[in-house]
Image (cartoon, helix red, strand yellow):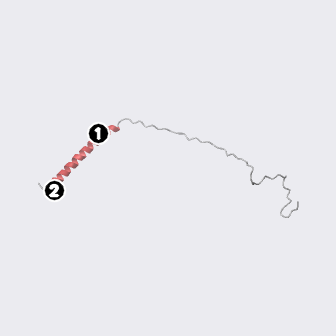
Amino acid sequence: MDPRTRWIIGLLLALVIGLGVGLAIVAGDDDADDSETVTLQTETEATETEVEPTVTQTTPTDGGVAPPTGGKPDGSGGLGAQP
């Protein structure tokens, strides 16, 4: 028999044996998939909270501008006004 033919027959035989072993492994592994599996699912509820803005009034300190102390302006005055 030709050496080349022996190599081809040997490779084909190894391929058939390998496919048979792989098929046996896959067939045996499918039985394990039929087992009962427990899956835990949790649901979380989103809560919406409304936050009202807070307004704070501060008085300037250390070089800030002081609030006016006089009454309402009467419309007189300006750049050329005399006190």
Q: Is residue 23 left or right of residue 57?
A: left
The correct choice, above or below, for 1 with respect to 27 in the image is below
Residue 37's spot in the image, x, y percent?
Answer: 39, 36
Q: Secondary structure at mark 2?
A: helix
Residue 27's spot in the image, x, y percent?
Answer: 29, 41
In the rendered structure, find residue 28 and report the number of the disc placed on it. Answer: 1
Of circles 1 and 2, the one toward us is: 2
Give the CA separation, mark 1 to mark 2: 36 Å
In the rendered structure, find residue 4 and report the number of the disc placed on it. Answer: 2
Of the two numbered discs 1 and 2 on the same chain, state the one appearing first in sequence: 2
Q: Is residue 41 left or right of residue 14?
A: right
Three-letter code for the amino acid on which mark 1 is drawn? Gly
- Looking at the image, which residue sits at the far right? 83
Q: Nearer the viewer, residue 73 or 81?
A: 81
How busy is the neighbourhood of tag 2: few (under 14 within 10 Å), some, or many (20 plus)? few
- Displayed quadrant of residue 28: top left
Residue at 31 percent of width and 37 percent of height: 31
Residue 67's spot in the image, x, y percent?
Answer: 79, 52
Residue 65's spot in the image, x, y percent?
Answer: 76, 54
